[in-house]
Image: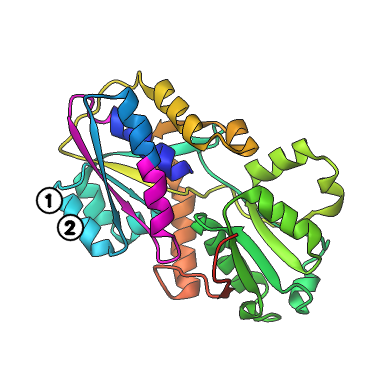
C-alpha cells in the first residue's frame, strides 16, 4: 500500500500545473500485475474526482532497462522503484532526477523486520522442525533480509529450500498463520507487530520474536525527473485522505498513517546502502530473488 500512497502524493506535488503526469513503476517477477492494475484503476478514479486538471497515466515495467530508458527520455516524470534498483543504476539515476521521495508509515522513515514464531529459539530452524515461512507479497525487503540473515547465521545448519514460502497480502494474516501453526515462521514489520499486540495483548504470550533486522529498510523510492519543478505541498492532506479512502477497508490500514517525505540528503539511505553492498557480496547477485519453494498463490 505504501507504494500507492507514494505515487498519489508525489504526482500532485511535483508539478501542479501539468495536465499529464506519466508514472513508471518497476515491479518484480513475484508481484502480480493484475492486482496492481486494479489498485491503480481505483486510485486513478479517486484522484481524478478531486483533481480535474490533472491526468495520471501509469506504466508498469518488469524490464529495468526499458523503464530506465523511458526516464532518460523524460517519457516518465515519476519513477518508482525498490531501492535496489536505485543502487544498481545509481550513477545514471543521480544524473536524471531532481528529488527523491519516500512514503513514511506512522512517521517512521525506515522499517524494521521481525522474524516471529511460536517457538522461542532459532534451534528449531536449525534442526528442520520449522518448515513454513510466511511473508508479505509486496515486501521485498523482508525476504532480502531473511536471505541475508539465513546466510549469515543459519546456512551451515539448515537448507532454506526446505522451507515452503507462502506469500500473504496482510500482516495480520501472518500473525494468524504463525499462531495456529507451530512449525511456521513469519516476517512482519515492527510497526505492524506493535499494533497487533496492542489490539490483542495475549498474542505476545504465544508468538515470539526470534530475530530483528536493523531499522534501515526502505520499501520504495520515488524519483521526480529533473525536467519538472517542485510545486506547493498544500495538497498532502487531501492526497492522504484519498489513500485512506481507497485502502480503509481493513482495521490496520485505518490505524496506520502515511505521509510523504522528501529527502534533503542521502544520510537516511546510508545504512541501507551499506547493507546492499554487504548483501550483494555475500549472495553474489545484485538483484535478489527469494529462493525457497514458493506457494502457487498469495493468501
Q: Mark 2: few, some, or many residues within 10 Å (few <14, many ≥20)?
A: few
Find residue 26 and report its horizontal and vertical position in percent.
33, 56
Q: Does dot 2 land on a helix, a strand or a loop?
A: helix
Residue 264 can be seen in this image: no
**Is there any visible trace of residue 239 in the rendered image?**
yes
Dot label at residue 69: 2
Is residue 53 rendered magenta in the image? Answer: no
Residue span colored magenta? 13-41
Residue count near mark 1 (Cα–Cα under 10 Å), binned few <14, some 14–19, many ≥20? few
Residue visible at 79% across and 55% down in the picture: 208
- In the rendering, at what x and y percent does residue 17 appear? 18, 24
Name, please, the residue furthest toward the top.
234
Q: Name the residue under label 1.
A: 73
Q: In which quarter of the image is residue 89?
A: bottom left
| Residue lying at 71% horizontally and 81% vertically, measured from the top left | 157
Q: In the rendered image, which quarter contains the C terminus?
A: bottom right
Q: Find numbered disc 1 in the image and state the secondary structure of the residue it sits on.
A: loop
User: Are the residues flagged by discs 2 and 1 in contact, CB closer than 8 Å?
Assistant: yes
The residue shown at (44%, 63%) is 277
Residue 170, x across and y down, in percent: 60, 50
Q: Is residue 34 left or right of residue 189?
A: left
Q: In this view, does 279 lie above or below 251?
A: below
Q: Residue at x 64, y 52 (%)?
A: 188
294 with respect to 119 (left or right): left
Amino acid at each position: 500500500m505504501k507504494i500507492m500512497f507514494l505515487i498519489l502524493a508525489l504526482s500532485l506535488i511535483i508539478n501542479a500545473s501539468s495536465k499529464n503526469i506519466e508514472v513508471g513503476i518497476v515491479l518484480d517477477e513475484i508481484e502480480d500485475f493484475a492486482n496492481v492494475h486494479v489498485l491503480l484503476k481505483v486510485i486513478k478514479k479517486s484522484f481524478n474526482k478531486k483533481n480535474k486538471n490533472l491526468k495520471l497515466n501509469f506504466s508498469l515495467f518488469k524490464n529495468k532497462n526499458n523503464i530506465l530508458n523511458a526516464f532518460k527520455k523524460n517519457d516518465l516524470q515519476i519513477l518508482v522503484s525498490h531501492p535496489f534498483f536505485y543502487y544498481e543504476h545509481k550513477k545514471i539515476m543521480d544524473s536524471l532526477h531532481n528529488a527523491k521521495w519516500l512514503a513514511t508509515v506512522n512517521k517512521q522513515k525506515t522499517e524494521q523486520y521481525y522474524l516471529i514464531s511460536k517457538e522461542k529459539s532459532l534451534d528449531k530452524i536449525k534442526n528442520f522442525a520449522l518448515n513454513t515461512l510466511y511473508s508479505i507479497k509486496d515486501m521485498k525487503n523482508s525476504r532480502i533480509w531473511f536471505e541475508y540473515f539465513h546466510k549469515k547465521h543459519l546456512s551451515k545448519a539448515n537448507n532454506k529450500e526446505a522451507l515452503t514460502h507462502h506469500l500473504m497480502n496482510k500482516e495480520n494474516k501472518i500473525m494468524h498463520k504463525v499462531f495456529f501453526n507451530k512449525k511456521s515462521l513469519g516476517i512482519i514489520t515492527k510497526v505492524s507487530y506493535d499494533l497487533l499486540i496492542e489490539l490483542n495483548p495475549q498474542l505476545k504470550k504465544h508468538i515470539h520474536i526470534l530475530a530483528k533486522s536493523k531499522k534501515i529498510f526502505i520499501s520504495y523510492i520515488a524519483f521526480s525527473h529533473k525536467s519538472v519543478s517542485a510545486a506547493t505541498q498544500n495538497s498532502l492532506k487531501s492526497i492522504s485522505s484519498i489513500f485512506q479512502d481507497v485502502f480503509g477497508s481493513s482495521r490496520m490500514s485505518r490505524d496506520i498513517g502515511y505521509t510523504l517525505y522528501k529527502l534533503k540528503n542521502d544520510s537516511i539511505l546510508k545504512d541501507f546502502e551499506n547493507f546492499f553492498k554487504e548483501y550483494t557480496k555475500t549472495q553474489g547477485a545484485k538483484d535478489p530473488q527469494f529462493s525457497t519453494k514458493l506457494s502457487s498463490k498469495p493468501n
